[in-house]
């Protein structure tokens, strides 16, 4: 009797290169955008932790796509848990089983898909090169088809900062070799407003929104509609700060008008749009109701600092502690704003008619 042949399990690299749709979605420019977003998200995490000030994205003539930051660098000087490679090498080659490779928080996601971080860009590329400053040394390591060409090595010593990752996507796997300029530019512009103070650079442009969501309101409104006429040149409410385990930024402006012209809401959690809103919106709506103000347009972004809740968020955010945090954080500043500008229940304001 013939014994069945043993089934060989695919390595992670083989799995992602054989079935990329399971990891990066449908092949094409959007899949390539997802790989860029994965690298950008890691760099923005460095900004949120106070370690970086910019993210620079470049597309080179030879097809290489580069994402750089001035953060604290990758741990090429630390061993992996199994001592088989540096920890940074491990991150490039092996998927993590937690929301983040090192379980850090905050952690953001600038793409709508769930991600697996550095391994997705590495295993979907013909070649990837990483150069990263770490504790006074510039480390370098290259990969071919996701496999290290050699152990990481130091190429210079000094006081440099940051990480520069350049990858050449495998078009047969990703479905595109060059990113779509429009969506990539829009992603960077939007991220600049979601993370106030961060510089995002691309193709000769620098996106930088000092007032974050307060500036974003001017990109979201209807320039030609009635709604704009009711809030053009009106004061903008904006509050940004941390409350407990939540970093919160909120902005609102104008008056919604009649009941058929409802307030427009735009909400995000950990960098990802929550199109169906949820607990964070309820918290802000509560304090707006209490002040008797229905703005024309509202923007709200919540970032979690508790590692347990720093994973990707679906379209709706159901987490009651976020509702409480938003309500408590915004109550006083919103009340002070409404009093100063005579908005709300006790104000006589002809603009609301």
Image (tube, rainbow, N blue to C red):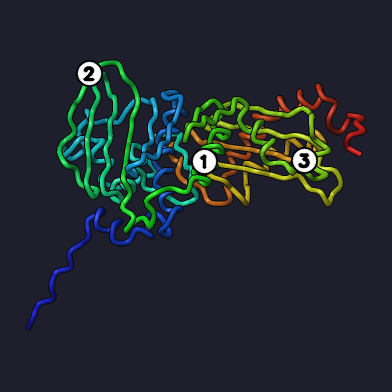
Give the number of callouts: 3
Question: Viewer-proximal residue, 85 or 110?
Answer: 110
Q: Identify the image quadrant of the C terminus.
A: top right
Tell me if mark 2 has few (under 14), some (14-19) or many (20+) residues whose alpha carbon lies within 10 angstroms of its own. few
Residue 296: mark = 3
- Nearer the N terminus, badge 3 or badge 2? 2
Frontmost of labels 2 and 1 is 1
Residue 290: x and y, percent?
78, 35
Residue 292: x and y, percent?
82, 36
- Nearer the N terminus, badge 1 or badge 3? 1
Frontmost of labels 1 and 3 is 1
Question: The residue tagged with tag 3: helix, strand or loop?
Answer: loop
Q: CA distance from mark 3 to mark 2?
A: 54 Å
- Badge 2 is on which residue? 157
In the image, 101: left or right of 275? left
Q: Residue farthest to the bottom? A: 1
Question: The residue tagged with tag 2: helix, strand or loop?
Answer: strand
Residue 185: mark = 1
Residue 171 vertical position relative to residue 299 in the rendered view, above or below: below
Q: Is residue 264 visible?
A: yes
Q: CA distance from mark 2 to mark 1?
A: 34 Å
- Nearer the N terminus, badge 2 or badge 1? 2
In the image, 251: left or right of 103? right
Question: The residue tagged with tag 1: helix, strand or loop?
Answer: helix
Residue 7 vertical position relative to residue 183 in the rendered view, above or below: below
Tell me if mark 1 has few (under 14), some (14-19) or many (20+) residues whose alpha carbon lies within 10 angstroms of its own. some
Residue 347: x and y, percent?
89, 29
Q: Residue at x 27, y 42 (%)?
A: 128
Q: CA distance from mark 1 to mark 3?
A: 27 Å
Residue 18 vertical position relative to residue 183 in the rendered view, above or below: below
Q: Identify the image quadrant of the N terminus.
A: bottom left
């Amino acid at each position: 009797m013939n014994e069945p042949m043993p089934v060989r399990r695919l390595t992670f690299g083989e799995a992602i290169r054989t079935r990329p749709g399971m990891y990066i979605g449908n092949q094409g420019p959007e899949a390539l955008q997802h790989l860029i977003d994965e690298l950008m998200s890691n760099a923005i995490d460095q900004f949120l932790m106070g370690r970086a000030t910019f993210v620079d994205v470049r597309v080179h003539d030879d097809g290489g796509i580069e994402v750089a930051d001035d953060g604290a660098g990758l741990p090429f000087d630390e061993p992996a848990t199994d001592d088989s490679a540096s920890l940074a090498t491990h991150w490039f080659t092996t998927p993590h089983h937690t929301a983040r490779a090192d379980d850090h928080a905050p952690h953001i996601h600038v793409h709508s898909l769930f991600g697996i971080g550095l391994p997705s860009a590495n295993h979907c590329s013909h070649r990837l090169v990483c150069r990263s400053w770490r504790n006074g040394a510039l480390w370098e390591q290259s990969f071919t088809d996701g496999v290290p060409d050699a152990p990481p090595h130091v190429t210079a010593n000094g006081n440099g900062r940051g990480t520069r990752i350049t990858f050449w996507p495998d078009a047969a796997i990703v479905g595109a070799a060059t990113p779509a300029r429009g969506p990539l530019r829009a992603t960077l512009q939007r991220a600049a407003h979601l993370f106030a103070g961060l510089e995002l650079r691309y193709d000769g442009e620098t996106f930088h929104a000092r007032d974050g969501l307060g500036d974003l309101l001017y990109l979201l409104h209807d320039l030609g509609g009635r709604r704009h006429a009711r809030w053009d040149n009106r004061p903008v409410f904006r509050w940004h700060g941390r409350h407990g385990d939540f970093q919160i930024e909120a902005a609102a402006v104008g008056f919604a008008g009649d009941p058929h012209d409802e307030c427009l809401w735009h909400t995000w959690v950990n960098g990802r749009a929550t199109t169906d809103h949820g607990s964070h919106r309820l918290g802000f709506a509560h304090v707006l109701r209490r002040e008797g103000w229905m703005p024309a347009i509202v923007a709200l972004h919540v970032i979690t600092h508790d590692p347990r809740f720093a994973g990707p968020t679906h379209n709706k955010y159901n987490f009651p502690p976020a509702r409480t945090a938003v309500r408590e954080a915004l109550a006083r500043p919103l009340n002070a704003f409404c009093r100063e500008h005579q908005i709300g229940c006790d104000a006589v304001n002809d603009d609301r008619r």
